[in-house]
Image (spheres, rainbow, N blue to C red):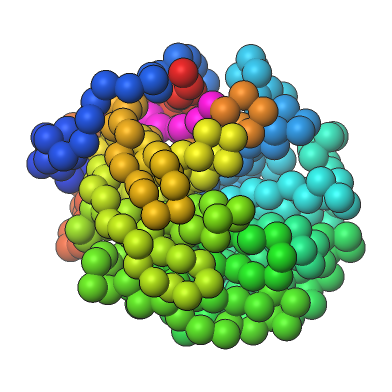
């Protein structure tokens, strides 16, 4: 994702008080487990394989894998250069890591099956169950590289007209992908491998960085950076149905059809829970206090729990010297990398 793991730390002191003033803190969800697992490197999207009970966490040059129930370490998928995300296709039994080259692996043994050369800069990743294709998202051309999950063959590319962040599939041939630099949502015909339109959300929010979908009711939840809001749309028409406040620094979102709730994780240390009372009635149900930096998350559909990842960060005075211009990176305290579990 374009907004790297250290970006939101500087916003925390300002944004936490704003978020807590806007949204309710009390509710059914809380942090029920926190496990410090350590390890070097940053991170990006985290992925829960609910069926096979594994948690996949990209860590720069490798993917670390944990037992989803106990958070005990299970192994590592090595040689994943600048990896950002992982998906597992249950039909083919193949996993894919969004890096360059893309790594296709066996999710049971964690062994590499093949590597796949792609263009662009692989970032996000999306599985489309309708076509059994894996979409590798990139901020540079091509925006989407399409890979056949069965054999790992590159079958095409898609021009989205902007820089993609998170996306969602309706399982019926349509993809919806946030375009962070265009303040819009790209609509994609996944079978034709073609972008068919864009939903403009610039009147309500900009910099969309998280996407979730209620497939049954055809509702999109697009979580934005500026202002920190969730723009809720009809997936078929693009009509905006509601706009609700969230925390600062979103980088991932999920929808749980079992509870009719959308979740967004923010780097300011909050998890926003939006309740869909009906296809036209939405409300912020709770703002869960997590931990600073916990901006990426994943849903375990079996337990209805959310997993987030973060670490402790050094104070600005502890920063390495020689950094000039732009945003300064916040160094991670060694051994502080942590997995959080949020549940009822």
Above/below status of 124 relative to 316: below
Please provide percent x and percent y for residue 341: 49, 23
* Nearer to the camera, 232 or 164: 232
Above/below status of 297 relative to 324: above
- As for residue 306 lying within the magenta part, the answer is yes
Q: Is residue 101 left or right of residue 161?
A: right
Residue plotted at (57% across, 28% down): 304
Please provide percent x and percent y for residue 261: 46, 39
Does residue 3 appear in this view?
no
Q: Is residue 57 left or right of residue 17?
A: right
Main SS of residues in magenta: strand
Above/below status of 75 relative to 113: above
Does residue 70 appear in this view?
yes
Q: Is residue 57 left or right of residue 75?
A: left
Quarter of the N terminus within the rendering: bottom left
Total of numbered circles in the picture? 0
Residue plotted at (71% across, 65% down): 172
The magenta segment is 305-313
- As for residue 18 lying within the magenta part, the answer is no
Please provide percent x and percent y for residue 300: 61, 32
Above/below status of 126 relative to 23: below
Residue plotted at (36% across, 77% down): 200
Please provide percent x and percent y for residue 76: 69, 34
Corner quadrant of residue 256? top right
Residue plotted at (71% across, 40% down): 77
* Nearer to the camera, 50 or 259: 259
* Nearer to the camera, 333 or 235: 235
């Amino acid at each position: 994702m374009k907004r790297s793991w250290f970006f939101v730390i500087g916003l925390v002191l300002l944004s936490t008080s704003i978020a807590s003033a806007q949204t309710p803190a009390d509710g059914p969800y809380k942090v029920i487990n926190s496990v410090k697992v350590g390890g070097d490197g940053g991170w990006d999207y985290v992925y829960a394989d609910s069926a096979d009970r594994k948690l996949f966490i990209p860590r720069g040059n490798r993917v670390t894998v944990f037992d989803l129930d106990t958070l005990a370490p299970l192994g590592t998928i090595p040689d994943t250069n600048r990896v950002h995300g992982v998906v597992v296709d249950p039909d083919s039994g193949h996993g894919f890591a969004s890096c360059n080259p893309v790594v296709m692996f066996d999710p049971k043994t964690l062994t590499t099956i093949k590597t796949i050369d792609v263009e662009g800069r692989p970032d996000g990743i999306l599985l489309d169950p309708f076509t059994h294709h894996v979409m590798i998202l990139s901020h540079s051309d091509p925006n989407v590289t399409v890979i056949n999950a069965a054999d790992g063959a590159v079958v095409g590319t898609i021009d989205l007209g902007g820089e993609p962040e998170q996306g969602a599939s309706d399982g019926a041939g349509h993809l919806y992908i946030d375009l962070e630099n265009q303040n819009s949502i790209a609509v994609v015909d996944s079978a034709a491998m073609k972008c068919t339109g864009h939903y403009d959300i610039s009147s309500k929010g900009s910099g969309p960085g998280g996407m979730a979908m209620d497939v049954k009711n055809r509702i999109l939840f697009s979580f934005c950076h500026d202002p920190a809001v969730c723009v809720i749309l009809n997936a078929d028409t693009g009509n905006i149905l509601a706009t609700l406040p969230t925390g600062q620094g979103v980088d991932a979102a999920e929808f749980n059809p079992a509870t009719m709730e959308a979740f967004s994780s923010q780097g300011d240390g909050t998890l926003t829970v939006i309740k869909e009372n009906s296809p036209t009635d939405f409300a912020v149900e709770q703002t869960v206090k997590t931990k600073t930096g916990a901006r990426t998350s994943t849903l375990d559909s079996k337990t209805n729990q959310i997993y987030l990842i973060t670490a402790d960060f050094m104070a600005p005075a502890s920063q390495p010297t020689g950094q000039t211009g732009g945003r300064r990176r916040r160094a991670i305290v060694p051994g502080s990398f942590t997995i959080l579990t949020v549940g009822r």
